[in-house]
Image: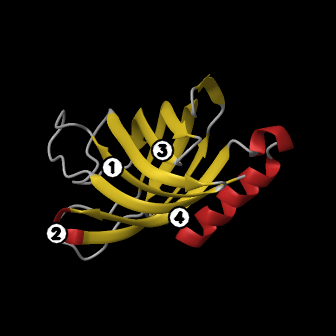
Amino acid sequence: MPSPMPRIRFPALCAVAIAAAAAFPAAAQSQFELSAGPSWTRDNEVTPVVAAAWLPEFRALDNALLRWELGVVHVRGRDDTRHDLVDDVTVGHAGLRYDRTDNGLTLGFGIGVQTGYTDALSGDPQFISTVGWRWDRFSVLARHISNASLHQPNDGETMVVAAWRF
């Protein structure tokens, strides 16, 4: 019987994301965002998440910018839970991000596909909603990922992340 693939370690994933940010040209870096923080699902089971997004400007609005959001969110699996949450799940997504330039309000919505499977993230498509505040390059974001009950179980993941734009 072949041995299972080893889980990607969270610090290694962060190092890869930082290396990817450094590889972008200077013009694109002001639109690249890295974030990390905790995520919760049913029964308050917590795990770390890390995310990266490219946020090119789509349209300027009065006191706001509308941006494309192309990103990836990695949710680390959890051991020793009564739910099926063992697998690491990675969700690639595309959507829009609305950034207020006067007060820092940030809103986003996207749709994505996943690799891995848990009771929390149990099938494509996944919908990603974001709300938060941004101060220059730093943001605090609350994000929820769920399949909107298209597949069961549908626990979803709710996370609070700190983000930095390069």
Looking at the rendered structure, the kind of residue marked 1 is: His
Instruction: Determine whether, in the image, residue 98 is placed left or right of residue 23.
Output: left
Element under label 3?
A: strand
Label 1 vs label 4, nearer the camera: 1
Looking at the rendered structure, the kind of residue marked 3 is: Thr
Mark 4 — residue?
8
Tell me the number on the disc at residue 144. Answer: 1
What is the spatial separation of the Cα atoms under label 1 and label 3, in whole angstroms? 14 Å
Looking at the rendered structure, the kind of residue marked 4 is: Ile
Tell me the number on the disc at residue 4. Answer: none
Element under label 4?
A: loop
**Residue most toward the right?**
26
What is the spatial separation of the Cα atoms under label 1 and label 4, in whole angstroms? 22 Å
Mark 2 — residue?
43
Label 2 vs label 1, nearer the camera: 1
* Disc 3 packing (10 Å; few <14; some 14–19; many ≥20): many
